[in-house]
Amino acid sequence: MIQLRYFASLRERVGTGAEAIPCPDFSTPDRPLTVADLLLLLRQRGEPWNDALGGDQPLLAAVNQAMARLDTPVQDGDEVAFFPPVTGG
């Protein structure tokens, strides 16, 4: 399972702060599952996922609490968090 976390406005837009999904089998020996693959899978759910996680929205990600890029590998047991780039404080 992959633990997904949504923060700030993303949590409000998708209606949950967390969920667990089975690790999708997008990877091959030459190319592991990535953050970009997860985003594509989530956007394919339709609304509100597509709107909240779509390409026009600025979005940051972390894998196991370390900042991640779209090409960062993700594997079974990881925690992946998504959040907007600007937060109050």
Image (cartoon, rainbow, N blue to C red):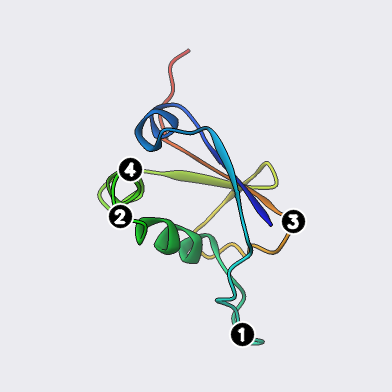
Q: Secondary structure at mark 3?
A: loop
Dot 3 corresponds to which residue?
Answer: 77
Q: What residue is pinned by disc 4?
A: 52
**Residue at 64% from the left image edge and 62% from the top image edge:** 74
Please give the residue where the numbered disc 2 appears in the rendered image. Answer: 46
Mark 3 closeness class: few <14, some 14–19, many ≥20 residues within 10 Å: few
Q: Residue at x 42, y 35 (%)?
A: 85
Tell me which amino acid carries mark 1: Thr
Measured as percent of width and height from the top left, residue 54 is found at 30, 52
Are the two marked residues, 2 and 1, in contact with CB atoms closer than 8 angstroms? no
Label total for image? 4
The answer to which quarter of the image holds residue 88 is top left
> Residue at left 52%, top 56%?
69
- The secondary element bearing badge 4 is classed as helix
Task: Give the label, 1 or 3, closer to the camera.
Answer: 3
Q: Are marks 4 and 1 in contact (CB under 8 Å)?
A: no
Q: Which residue is mark 1?
A: 28
**Which residue is at a point 70% across and 47% down the rendered structure image?**
64
